[in-house]
Amino acid sequence: MTVTRRIRFNKTKTKLLLDISLAVAFLAALEPSLTGFYWHEWLGIGLGAAFIVHVLLSWSWVTSVTRRFFGRTSGQARLNYVLNQVLLAAMGAVIASGLVISKTLGTADALGISFQASDTWEEIHRWVPQVALIVVGIHLGLHWKWIVSTVQRTVWKPRRRRQTLAQLPRVSARS
Ligand code: HEM
């Protein structure tokens, strides 16, 4: 007899887990002294990759709002869209400036970037994360309902349903 286990890809759960990891990793990256520069730099690169996956998982939303931006769409969707663009630009600037000023990975040399890491790049890397933090806060606020309802649906409710099903045989045995 062959036993086949079906592993189902739950997109919503994946998004939730990725978003929580992104938020925690972003907070950790804001304080390089927590990890030291070596791990800070790897964490920043990992954040960049995770951020791209985060955008790709919401790609259908991005394309549909892009098409309707100047047409029939809600003010909330437009605000979200503009904030997401600001966040994308901020993340791009933080990661690019990080790669230029890198102390341990030597990424600027590896990428063949010839200019010296100037004070300007360090200033960019010092200030843009603060702007990104504010935008991330607003972004989370605008998606708060989704976060709460997804946690309820995927974390709390399935557990409760499993308990109810586990109790069923005992209830029917007594009656
Ligand atoms: C989203 C990703 C990132 C965030 C939020 C972030 C945030 C920060 C912050 C807040 C600081 C302290 C700035 C200060 O007050 O001096 C810092 C420093 C630093 N970061 Fe990042 N960073 C990120 C990605 C990267 C990456 C990808 C690299 C390199 C590969 C990098 C390299 C550095 C370096 C070398 C410093 C020390 C700068 C100095 O000399 O003070 N960071 N980062």
Image (spheres, rainbow, N blue to C red):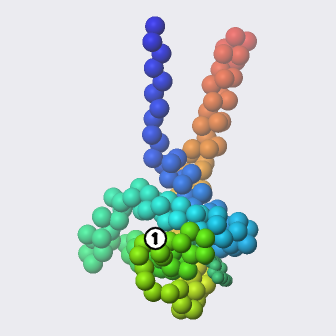
The answer to whether residue 135 of the structure is visible from this angle is no
Q: Nearer the viewer, residue 73 or 37?
A: 37
Q: Which residue is mark 1?
A: 110
Helix, strand or loop at label 1? It is: helix
Q: Which residue is located at x 61 percent, y 70 percent?
A: 104
**Ligand 1 lies in which image quarter?**
bottom right
Q: Which amino acid, by three-letter code, is at mark 1? A: Ala
In the rendered structure, the answer to whether residue 113 lies left or right of residue 63 reads right
In the rendered structure, the answer to whether residue 72 lies left or right of residue 119 reads left
The answer to whether residue 51 of the structure is visible from this angle is yes
Residue furthest bottom as drawn: 119
Q: Which residue is located at x 55 percent, y 80 percent?
A: 101
**Which image quadrant: the C terminus?**
top right
Residue 90: image location, x then y, percent: 49, 79
Residue 157: image location, x then y, percent: 61, 41
Residue 109: image location, x then y, percent: 47, 75
Q: Quadrant of residue 111?
A: bottom left
In the rendered structure, the answer to whether residue 58 lies left or right of residue 175 reads left
Residue 75: image location, x then y, percent: 40, 76
Q: Nearer the viewer, residue 139 or 129?
A: 129
Q: Quadrant of residue 30?
A: bottom right
Q: Which residue is located at x 45 percent, y 27 percent?
A: 6
Vertical order, 64 against 174 (above or below): below
Vertical order, 167 against 107 (above or below): above
Vertical order, 175 against 142 (above or below): above
